[in-house]
Amino acid sequence: MTINIASAAVSLLSLYYASRLSIIFRSGMLQKSWRGIAIGMVLVSIANLIFLARTIIMAEGMSQILLYAGAITAFMGGLFLLFGLRKEYRRLCEGKREPVATEQKVQS
């Protein structure tokens, strides 16, 4: 039971900070990629809370509904995280590309 309380606390804190960041990013402060990462983290935190609720609720029918809802939410959050991280990776890699060395003609 203690691990459930700790898991809920971590999920709630992650949800809080990720939602705050997504609000900041929505106003255009940083890149779209980080907005996607923050939204993905919000969805993953919500999914974690859904899975936690599933362990607390023992009703068979409700347990299956929570399992599917949590899985779909986690999948969507994972996609947002994946695409946001990929977009940020590509943006950072574009900045590191060095120009191709070309021969310069010497003027005489």
Image: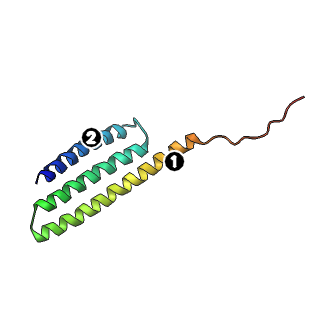
Q: Is residue 14 left or right of residue 99?
A: left
In this picture, is 30 found above or below 59? above
Which residue is the extreme one toward the top?
108
Per the rendering, the mark at residue 90 is: 1
Badge 2 local density, few (<14 within 10 Å), some, or many (20+)? some
Q: How is the image coloured?
A: rainbow
Which quarter of the image is occupied by the C terminus?
top right
Residue contact between numbered discs 2 and 1, judged by CB atoms under 8 Å: no
Q: What's the distance in space between the residues labelled 2 and 1, CA to CA?
A: 25 Å
Q: Nearer the viewer, residue 82 or 21?
A: 82
The residue tagged with tag 1: helix, strand or loop? helix
Identity of the residue drawn at 54% across and 44% down = 93
Q: Name the residue type under label 1.
A: Arg
Could you say whether the residue bearing mark 2 is in a helix, strand or loop?
Answer: helix
Image location of residue 34, percent across then percent down: 39, 43
Residue on which disc 2 sits: 17
Could you tell me which residue is drawn at 37 percent across and 53 percent down? Answer: 80
